[in-house]
Image: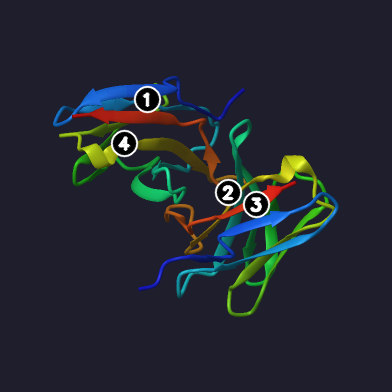
Amino acid sequence: KAGVTQTPRYLIKTRGQQVTLSCSPISGHRSVSWYQQTPGQGLQFLFEYFSETQRNKGNFPGRFSGRQFSNSRSEMNVSTLELGDSALYLCASSFDSLYNEQFFGPGTRLTVL
Amino acid sequence: AQKITQTQPGMFVQEKEAVTLDCTYDTSDQSYGLFWYKQPSSGEMIFLIYQGSYDEQNATEGRYSLNFQKARKSANLVISASQLGDSAMYFCAMREGSGGSNYKLTFGKGTLLTVNP
């Protein structure tokens, strides 16, 4: 069974640009969550999607947005990039249950210059 | 207040010995789940073990066990017979069951484990 895949794995952008990251969940998983990981702030929840609906959103500015498609694949977009957006962006998928683990993808490492 | 507290920024252990990584949590919910993840230097988060708030027995998965003390709100990870490949960052996380917060994991700051040969 294929795991969670994320593309691209590495990305270098400059301030002011925008970026789109993609995540394909494990087959059968309909919940997709996004996390940002930085050395200073650790792992922070961005948002979660289920059946193309955003169910929960973390405390991030509106520059961070996402969507989910009918096949459960998800994308997140960051507009007007700032230096502080440099981070590892992790996507996780799971069954829709409080008691099921989230399986993470390898992450996209974004560097903003 | 922090939801998940990992008080050990770094830990060292000799190969083949056991090690305990501490985790305390804070929640007023009755339904919640506790998770441990391992993150090697490659960056991928690897699920290790899960404990539900209503589970009466401590969870075990191979060399990993979770020492769950509900009254103390602690969920320590025990790794038996440490291996060099266990060297990594370890994160404790919680998913709570109430309101709109039950679809996200809240992570601790992590503990960097180094296994010495």
Mark 4 on the same chain as mark 3? no
Above-or-below relation of A13 to B65: below
Residue drawn at (24%, 24%) of the image: B13
Q: Is residue A90 left or right of residue B87?
A: right
Q: Identify the residue under disc 3.
A: A110
Structural crowding at the residue carrying mark 4, measured as other residues with C-alpha within 10 Å and reported as few (<14), some (14–19) or many (≥20): many
Q: Which of the labelled discs sits on residue B87, or is there none? A: 4
Mark 1 or 2: the one toward you: 1
Q: Quadrant of residue B17?
A: top left
Mark 4 on the same chain as mark 1? yes
Above-or-below relation of A17 to A27: above
Judging depth in this view, the residue of A66 and B17 nearest the camera is: B17
Of the two numbered discs 4 and 2 on the same chain, state the one appearing first in sequence: 4
Q: Is residue A93 visible?
A: yes
Q: Quadrant of the N terminus of chain A?
A: bottom left
* Amino acid bearing label 4: Ser
Pinpoint the chain carrying mark 1: B
Q: CA distance from mark 1 to mark 2?
A: 21 Å
Mark 3 or 1: the one toward you: 3
* Amino acid bearing label 3: Leu
Judging depth in this view, the residue of B62 and B28 nearest the camera is: B62
Pinpoint the chain carrying mark 4: B
Mark 3 on the same chain as mark 1? no
Q: Which of the labelled discs sits on residue B104, or is there none? A: 2
Secondary structure state at the residue bearing disc 1: loop
Q: Evaluate if marks 4 and 1 touch, with contact meaning CB atoms under 8 Å apart.
A: no
Q: CA distance from mark 4 to mark 2?
A: 26 Å
Q: Position of residue B101 (x, y in %)?
A: 62, 46
Q: Evaluate if marks 1 and 2 touch, with contact meaning CB atoms under 8 Å apart.
A: no
Secondary structure state at the residue bearing disc 2: loop
